[in-house]
Image: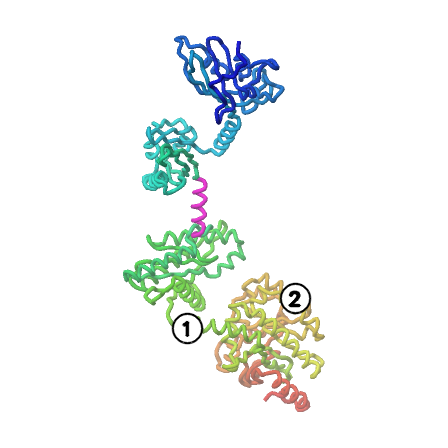
Amino acid sequence: MSSPTEPSPMAEAAGADGVWEVDPGAFTLRASPGFCRLIPPSRAGGAVTLADWLARLHPDDRPALASALAPATDGAVCGFSLDFRVADPASSLAGGSGGAGGEGEDGGAGPWLWLRALGMPWAGGRLAGTLSDITAQRMAEERASLALRGSGDGVWDWDLGAGTVHYSPEWKRIATRCSDTALDGTIHAWFARVVAADRAGLEGAIDMHLSGERPVLRHEFRMVDSSGQEHWVLVRGKAMRDVTGRAVRLTGTVTDITPRKKAEQQLLFDAFHDTMTGLANRTLLLDRVGQALNRDRRTASRPFAVLVIDLDRFKTVNETHGSAIGDRVLRVIAKRLEEARRMGDTLARVSADEFAMLLNDIDDVGDAITAAERLARSIAQPIDLFDHDIQITASIGIAHSVTGYERAEDLMRDASLAVFRAKQQGRNRVDVFDSNLRRQAMSAMRLETELRAALEQDQLCLFYQPIVSLAHNRIDGFEALIRWRHPERGLVPPGEFIPLAEETGLIVPIGRWALREAVRQIVQWQARFPRPVPLFMSVNVSPRQIHDDDLAGLVAEVLAGSGIPPSSLKLEITESLLMQDPAKSRDVMQRIRDMDVRLSIDDFGTGYSSLSYLHTFPADTLKIDRAFVSAISTGESSAAIVQVISTLAAILRMDVVAEGIETETEAEFLRDIMCKFGQGYLFHRPAPAEVVEALLTDATEDASDGAILGLG
C-alpha cells in the first residue's frame, strides 16, 4: 500500500512539477501534491498509487515505465529518464487518446499530456525522482518538426568534440539526390561532395562562425550529386557553446536552392541578352566595348571597331507578312551573323531591326570593311518563308577605335551615323564614320531644334506659285509651298529642312499647319476674286501624313469651316508614296475623293508604279516632273515621255499639269499636245501671299487685254 505521507527528502524541486519515491519491491508510491495534480488518485480523497500512475499512461508508453520501476533481479536499482503520455486529468475522457499525439486503447479521442520522469537510486533499494509537464515543449518540437519536414530541409548535427556528424534522410536526399546513399557520419563525407571551387568558401564560413566572427552560419555553395550533376544548396546553422564560449556542437539545416539559383541566372542572362535571338543586348555590348576601350588605354593594344548593322526596309516585312514571319526572319539573320562572327567578337541585337558587332584585334579599318562586307553577303542570302523566298539587305556603319574615344556610347553613336549616311546613299552599303559626318550630325541636330522652335514661333510661311491654264493664258490656281524665314539665316530653302522634318516626324504638324493656312488663304482669294470656276489650291501631302496621321479627318475638319467648294482643294501625292503601301494609300485617297476633293499624282514618271496600278487610284490629275519638261527645249528623247503622259491622261480622263516651264518653246509644245495646266518661272516664281494678291489684282484689271493675265 502507498503512504499518503510526502517523501521528506523529495521536497518540490525548482523546475519540476512534482516529486516521487517508489519502492519497487513493495510496489508502493509516495508522491508530492504537484505529482498528484498531474496524476490524481483513482479514488476521491485517497492517495495516488503506483497502479494509478501506470493506469493513466498511454498504452504504448506503459511497458517502458513499468520496466523502469520494476524490481531489479540482482537487487540493484538503476536511474532512468523517460518521456511518456498520460491522460489529462482535466478531461472527463481520461482513458481516451489525442493531445500531443498518440492513439488510445479504445481508439477514442481525448487529450494527452506529455510528462518526463527522472529517476535515481535511493536508500533501501528505492527509486526517487521528479515529474515534469513537458507538453508545451513537445508540442513546440512537434510543430518545428512538421515545419522542417514541410520545408523539405535536411538536418545535420556535428559533435565537434567527437568529430561525428548526424545527417537526416532529407539531408542525404538533398546532398546526393538519393536518400539511400550511405554516408560515414563524418564532416569529410559532406565536404567531399562540395564542388572543389566552393569548398574553401564553405570552410571559411564555418570557421568564421565557430570563432564568433559571425553570429550564425549562412552560406550558399554547390554540391555534386550521385550522378555527378551540380546543384546549389544553402546551409544554415548555429553553434552551441560551453561556459567559456568555445563551440562544442554545430547544428543546422541544408536547403536545395537550385530552382532559385537557376531563376537568378536566367534573370541575369535576360538582363544582358535579347530574349528572341539569345544574342547579347545593347547593355552587354556597351560593357564589352567599354572593356575594349579600357584595355586600349592601359596597354595600347591592337585597334578594334564597332559595326552597326541595320536591316533595309525591314518594316515592310512585318507589314506584308506579319510580325511572326518578321520574328522568324530576325532569328534566321541572327543565326547567320553568329555563324559569321569570329571567335572573341561580340554580336548583339540592339533594336528591333538593328544588330551590332564588336570586332576585336584588327589591323586597320580595311579589316572592318572586309568583315562588314562578309556579314552583308551572309544577310543577303535568300530566306525561305515556306511558300516563297525573300531577300533582305543591310546598311552597315563602322566606327574605328583609332579615331579616339572615351565612352562606348560614342562609338555606337558614330557607327549609327555611318549607317544613316549609308541609307541616304541608297542602302545596302558599308560606310565608315569620319569627323565630317559628326559635324553633319551636329548640324542636323541644331537644325532640328531650330525647326521645332520655328513651328512654335510662327517662322514658317507659305509661298504660292501660280498654276496657269495654258489654253487660256489664265491663272486658275496655285501650289502652296512651305518656306522658313529663319531669324538669322533668312529664307531657308525647303530642300534643307523638309527631309529632316520627314525623318523626325515634324512634317506631320507642319503639314497640318500648311493645309489649314493654304485653305484660309484660298478662302480670302475666292471671296475677293470671284470666278465662274473658283480658284483652286494645291497642297503637298507627306508620306508621314498618309501613314501616321488621320489625313482624311483633317481634310474634313478644315473644309467644314471654310465654306469653299471641296473641288477647289487639290492634294498632291508623290508617285513613290503610292507604291510604299498601295492598299493604305488607295483607302485614304478614296475617303478624301468621296468629299469631292481633287487628287494629283506628283512627279509622275519618276517613280516605279505600274500602269496597271494607276487606274485603281482615285486621282484626277497627273503632274509631269520638271526633268521631262526641260528636255523639250534640249531636244532630248525624254521629251517624248511628256507626250506619252499627256496621251495616257487623256485616255484615263485625267488633267495634266506640267511643272518647271521656263521657256516659251516648252509652253508651246505643251499647248500643242493639249496639256491643260502649267507652272514655272516662265509665268512666275513662288511668291508670298501679298505678291500673289497683287498679281491677281493686275490680272483682273488686264483681263480685257487678252494677255497672260498679270504674268510678265
Q: Amino acid at mark 1?
A: Arg
Q: Amino acid at mark 2?
A: Gly
Depth check: 556 or 360 in front? 360
> Is residue 36 shown left or right of residue 286?
right
* Disc 1 to disc 2: CB gap under 8 Å: no
Q: Is residue 643 magenta?
A: no
Task: Please identify the dominant SS of the magenta region.
Answer: helix
On the image, the x and y values in percent for residue 210 come to 35, 38
Residue at the spot 68% in from the left edge and 68% down from the top edge: 595
Mark 1 or 2, which is nearer the eye? Answer: 1
The colour scheme of the drawn protein is rainbow
Residue holding disc 1: 439
State the residue lying farthest toward the front: 8
On screen, residue 650 above or below 409: below
How packed mark 1 is, by other alpha carbons closer than 10 Å (few <14, some 14-19, many 20 or more), is few
Residue holding disc 2: 553
On screen, residue 161 above or below 24: below
Q: Is residue 267 magenta?
A: yes
Span colored in magenta: 258-273
On the image, the x and y values in percent for residue 72 come to 42, 10
Q: Which mark is residue 666?
A: none
Q: Earlier in the sequence, mark 1 or mark 2?
A: 1
How packed mark 2 is, by other alpha carbons closer than 10 Å (few <14, some 14-19, many 20 or more), is few
**Image quadrant where one finds the C terminus:** bottom right
On screen, residue 378 above or below 24: below
Res. 324 visible in picture: yes
On the image, the x and y values in percent for residue 121 come to 42, 16
Find numbered disc 1 in the image and state the secondary structure of the residue it sits on.
Answer: helix
Depth check: 711 or 472 in front? 711
Depth check: 436 or 89 in front? 89
